[in-house]
Amino acid sequence: MTIEVSLRHNFGGFLLDSAFRIERAGVTALFGPSGSGKTTIINAVAGLLRPDHGRIAIDGEVLLDTNAQIFVPARLRRTGYVFQDSRLFPHLTVRRNLLFGARRAQDGAILPALSDVVELLGLAPLLERKPARLSGGEKSRIALGRALLSGPRILLLDEPLAALDPQRKSEILPWLERLRDSVRLPMIYVTHAIEEVSRLAENLIVLHDGKVAASGSVFDLLSDPALGRLVPAHGTVFPAKVLEHRSDGLSALGFDGGIILIPQVARPPGSRLRVRIGAEDVIIARARPEAISANNVLPVQVGGGHAQSGTHVDVGLRCGGVRLIARITRASWERLGLGEGEDIFAIIKSVAVDPQTGPAPNGPE
């Protein structure tokens, strides 16, 4: 599915002037600070905002074209919208809240079965409850189910985890991963949380002051040191596959750069997962170090350095088809005297693996 968006809208003191094109399936994250225009964009896609100027098309069907005076009403756009506050009907049970989504479906739309959505999102124990008896994470899952039952061709999620505490966020993230991997609907996911981007997204659009600062694969952009000021606390995210579980308590993961060792994960060989390595967890050396505690010493090439402050430099590194970032002091950068293309070594201090990637959870929260 191809999604084309070009918008220009003046809010008085703020001008949104953004254009992008999504050509890959999966989750596309709209990332940026509050006030950068993220929610305005998905409101325009949903038909909840009529912008001053713009064009929106999904698979060639034009939903908005201000020059041609085309504006398809929201109810006819087949978008499933999940709001930050869930917006469940307090007087209805979970079952009836879910079925309300099916009532909104357009004639002829192919709808998922209620039982399939209930199983996908683990809602069976909740069906006869009302929203007042639900946790924030449970409400988010029901809002997702209601959106799916409307038969959408695209899901729009406006910071669905923003109102949740860290514990509830950790509970709902696996369900969002399951939704991403099972349904394969295109999703536009608004967030200002980089952890959600690294866990969920395949495509990334970075917004700054109402404009698109960067767009592309999340695996490329999160490891681009030039984006350090716009994507804070970033590092590297890349897909990997479990190769084997060793007798010494480590699991070997294969990726497009070699093999990396991590503490053993409860996933069978052949499972796919995401690996996250923080920029601060990478040390670089001109020569291969000996007799050190780190399990991972990878040959890499220098891709260049970008100063992020008066004291630190983010160094881009190429490891096969994967790009890493090492955040080192400016003094270390100057002392090493590294040049682009030089062969050096990356020592990985800590590796984070998304533990929920793979077989999905089940049961209530």
Image (spheres, rainbow, N blue to C red):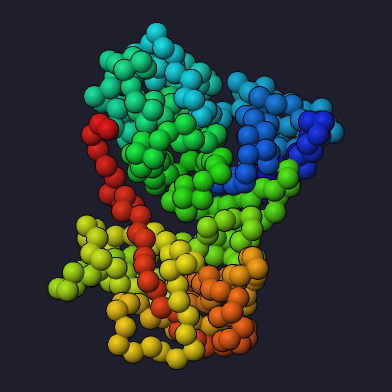
Q: Which of 44 and 251 is in front in this view?
A: 251
Above or below — where is 116 with respect to 346? above
Q: Residue furthest right?
A: 67
Residue 100 in the image, given as x and y percentages of width and height: 44, 16
Q: Quadrant of the N terminus?
A: top right
88 displayed left or right of 233: left
Residue 349 in the image, given as x and y percentages of width and height: 37, 71
Residue 180 in the image, given as x and y percentages of width and height: 42, 44
Q: Residue at x 52, y 28 (%)?
A: 83
Q: In which quarter of the image is the C terminus?
A: top left
Q: Which of 361 and 327 is in front in this view?
A: 327
306 displayed left or right of 233: right
Residue 303 in the image, given as x and y percentages of width and height: 59, 78
Q: Which residue is drawn at 30% across and 72% down?
A: 261
Q: What is the tally of numbered marks visible in this picture?
A: 0
Q: Can residue 149 be seen by looking at this rendering?
A: no
Q: Residue at x 27, y 49 (%)?
A: 359
Question: Dividing the picture into quarters, in which one does residue 63 lie?
Answer: top right
Q: Which residue is drawn at 41% across and 29% down?
A: 140
Above or below — where is 1 with respect to 281? above
Q: Which residue lies furthest to the top in this view?
A: 91
Q: Which of 6 and 90 is in front in this view?
A: 90
Q: Can residue 229 be seen by looking at this rendering?
A: yes
Q: Nearer the viewer, residue 302 or 287?
A: 287
315 displayed left or right of 116: right
